[in-house]
Image: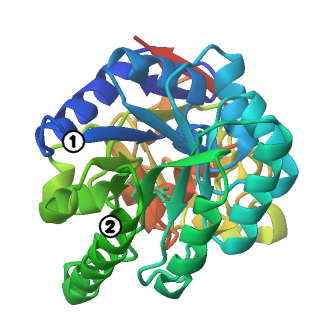
Amino acid sequence: MLKAQETLLEIDLNALEHNVTYLKSRIHSSTKFMAVVKSYAYGNAAVDIAKHLETLNADYFAVAYTYEGEQLRTSGVTTPILVLHPQAVSFNTLIENCLEPNLYSLKVLKEFVATAEVLNQKEYPVHLKFNTGLNRLGFSEAEIPEILSILKHTEAIKVTSLFSHMGASEDLNEKAFTIQQIETFKRISDLLLNQLPYKPMLHMCNTSGILNYPEAHFDMVRSGIGMYGFGNSEIENTHFKPITTLKTVISQIHHIPIGESVGYNRGYISDSPLTTATLPLGHADGIGREYGNGKGFVAINGQKAPIVGNTCMDMIMVDITNIDCQEGDEVIVFGDYPTAEEFAATANTISYELLTGLSQRIKRVVLK
Ligand SMILES: *Cc1c(COP(=O)(O)O)cnc(C)c1O
């Protein structure tokens, strides 16, 4: 561990390895593991993480957009990469980089076949996504005949996998909904498997699906948040290690007399003497205004220091009245305490949003 002298996002590859090992212990040894590294590996550092995951035998990667996959390829990543939400405008780039598209509608399927044919592709690997209740992306069951007819009339593509996505796998109150999704997916995939001359892989589970629905692991699972250290439940969290620590440093300490204010718009007015520390981190770094005014807190020497007043663009002020600390001391914004989940909860959001919203201007330090 480094002692921070500026704002740093520390990424612990040993913790990543711990989490992947745990996730793999929850799936059958023959089930493939797709590592979801979209959005800079949930705000971490996609290339370092993907390269380390290759050494941990990740079978597949997933990104959201073609550009993200292109960056991985440019950095030398050779594992197959599924692009979850490709746009037709980038199909040429996608093929040039050996990226594999999620085809989720008849329009996108036809557009991709057309591009693949123009580029003289043969059996180019594609993945078909079915909507089973999330109502976000995916073919409907009724479209199966037309999908089959398109597939029959082209040699340019070959379906590597059929998949779907769970809408509430972390919420056990929605178990009936998820089981319904699983049943729908089985019905759809059976229909296709019966008609196709080869056997694509099936996959449906994200991290919470892996943990809560072992009966739905099929041929492959897709994990994002679990690899980064969160199991989406208090019990599961005990098995994971957050891989990210956001650290910063005390720039300046102020002693605020009664009646003075702190920050823009006089967001805080002291009714008792207050000591504050100013930190080099603000909403431009991804710590939004929702965290201000006493909601969010950081840890200094293990003690809770709430944010005072409004979050500025590049700074926050925190209450250190009862904390023994000095200018230059290290501050933990989130890590072991508070965790990213705890910190995010103070602004009514989730670790996914907090992590992926961290600005690229924050220096990433990868610990090996
Ligand atoms: C982001 C994403 C995942 C990963 O979900 P986690 O909850 O982070 O494990 C899996 N599948 C799809 C389709 C996704 O978009």
Q: Nearer the viewer, residue 362 or 199?
A: 199
Answer above or below: position of 302 versus 182. Answer: above
Task: Please indicate, yes or no, whether residue 308 appears anywhere in the rendered image.
Answer: no
Tag 1: amino acid:
Thr
Relative vertical location of residue 188 with respect to residue 198 in this rendering, above or below: below
Q: Give percent across and percent down for residue 329.
A: 51, 25
The kind of residue tagged 2 is Asn
- Residue 127 on image: x %, y %: 53, 53
- 3D distance between C-alphas at marks 1 and 2: 22 Å
- Left or right position of 91 against 30: right
Pinpoint residue 50: horizontal percent, then vertical percent. Answer: 50, 25
Does residue 315 appear left or right of residue 84 in this picture?
Answer: right
Q: Quadrant of ligand 1?
A: bottom left
Residue shown at 19%/37% (left/top)?
24
Viewer-nearest of discs 1 and 2: 2
**Res 48 label:** none
Check disc 1 and report its element: helix, strand or loop.
loop
- Residue 233 vertical placement versus 253 (above, below): below
Q: Residue at x 36, y 47 (%)?
A: 223
Residue marked by disc 1:
31
Residue 214: quadrant of the picture: bottom left
- The local crowd at label 2, few if under 14, some if 14 to 19, many if 20 or more residues have their Cα within 10 Å, is few
| Quarter of the image where the C terminus is located | top left
Name the spot of residue 264 as percent of width and height, x first.
Answer: 82, 63
| Corner quadrant of residue 124 | top right
Between discs 1 and 2, the one toward the N terminus: 1
Disc 2 designates what residue? 194
13 left or right, relative to 87 = left
Q: Residues within 10 Å of mark 1 (few under 14, many from 20)?
A: some
